[in-house]
Amino acid sequence: MFFLDKQVVIPLHQLRAANPSVSKVNPAEKYIQVVSVEGHEFWFMGFLMYDKAVCILQEAINSAREMHP
């Protein structure tokens, strides 16, 4: 298996949501779907602390929304 380390930078005020998702075929595969305000979707996987990553992303998006209504 081959993995590439990529970095994606999106300003928080440009994000609409961070949604947790689990594969129906393999429940061990957990993803985070990040949706921009323009409707673009980004899917991420391989988090060491998945639940914490989801929580932090959602909190950050909510805080940015309060600062940039």
Image (cartoon, rainbow, N blue to C red):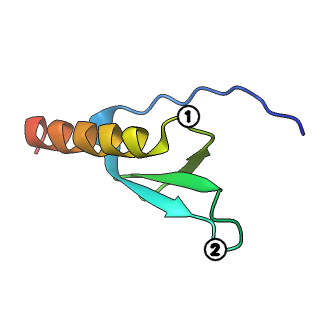
Residue 52 drawn at (x, y percent): 38, 39
Q: Is residue 24 visible to us here?
A: yes
Q: Answer left or right for 12 relative to 24.
A: left
Q: Residue at x 77, y 29 (%)?
A: 4
What secondary structure is marked by label 1? loop
Q: Is residue 41 visible to us here?
A: no
Toward which corner of the image does residue 63 lie, by quadrant? top left
Q: Answer left or right for 37 relative to 22.
A: left
Residue type at mark 1 is Leu
Q: Quadrant of the C terminus?
A: top left
Q: Residue at x 54, y 31 (%)?
A: 8
Toward which corner of the image does residue 11 lie, by quadrant? top left
Query: Residue at label 2?
Result: 24
**Is 61 in front, or is 30?**
30
Q: Residue at x 41, y 57 (%)?
A: 19
Disc number at residue 48?
A: 1
Residue 59 drawn at (x, y percent): 23, 41
Residue 1 drawn at (x, y percent): 90, 39
